[in-house]
Amino acid sequence: MVFTGISKEAEDILADNPGSRNSNAKLILAFLNSRGLEVVQSEGTTGVSILKTLRSVVSIVRSARKIQNDFGLYPSTDKIKKLREEKAEEVSDWAVEDKKDDEGVYP
């Protein structure tokens, strides 16, 4: 499988940093580090420059999860998989309940 662009960056991070397979925060920090960025704002760094870089944060997370879920590469630990499944089920249950009207009937 050949990945390009942001997906290639996600694959490289997943391959080189096992912690990024279980934690979006670690994935994002590794991504920012790969771009030579400090996470905290320091003297001479503007909020605007940090925000411009962070636009890719969502893309790197989506790409990493696609590599893990769709291609079965660099899986997270069983514990994290279970937590993600439970969270997905919670969100699904909430979405179903949210569709019902006041009397518990689907419109």
Image (cartoon, rainbow, N blue to C red):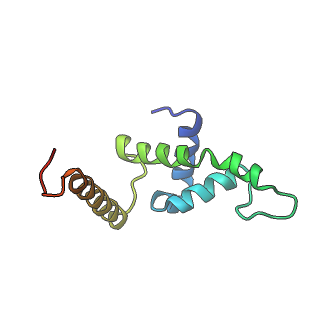
Residue 44 against residue 69 in the figure, above or below:
below
Residue 33 against residue 42 in the figure, above or below:
above
- The x, y position of residue 105, in whole percent, is 12, 52
Q: Quadrant of residue 97?
A: bottom left
Q: Identify the residue at image location x=81%, y=64%.
A: 42
Query: Which of the image's four quarters has the C terminus?
Result: top left
Count of marks placed on residues:
0
- The x, y position of residue 28, in whole percent, is 58, 55
- The x, y position of residue 43, in whole percent, is 86, 64
Residue reaching furthest to the front? 102
Residue reaching furthest to the bottom? 79
Q: Identify the residue at image location x=25%, y=54%.
A: 98
Residue 101 against residue 43 in the figure, above or below:
above
Q: Quadrant of residue 38?
A: bottom right
Front residue (pair 28, 91): 91
Q: Identify the residue at image location x=59%, y=34%.
A: 5
Query: Which of the image's four quarters has the N terminus?
Result: top left
Q: Is residue 58 left or right of residue 31?
A: left
Q: Is residue 63 left or right of residue 34?
A: left
Q: Is residue 36 visible?
A: no
Front residue (pair 100, 12): 100
Q: Is residue 89 left or right of residue 65?
A: left
Q: Identify the residue at image location x=52%, y=51%.
A: 15
- The x, y position of residue 11, in whole percent, is 52, 44
Front residue (pair 58, 98): 98
Q: Is residue 21 visible?
A: yes
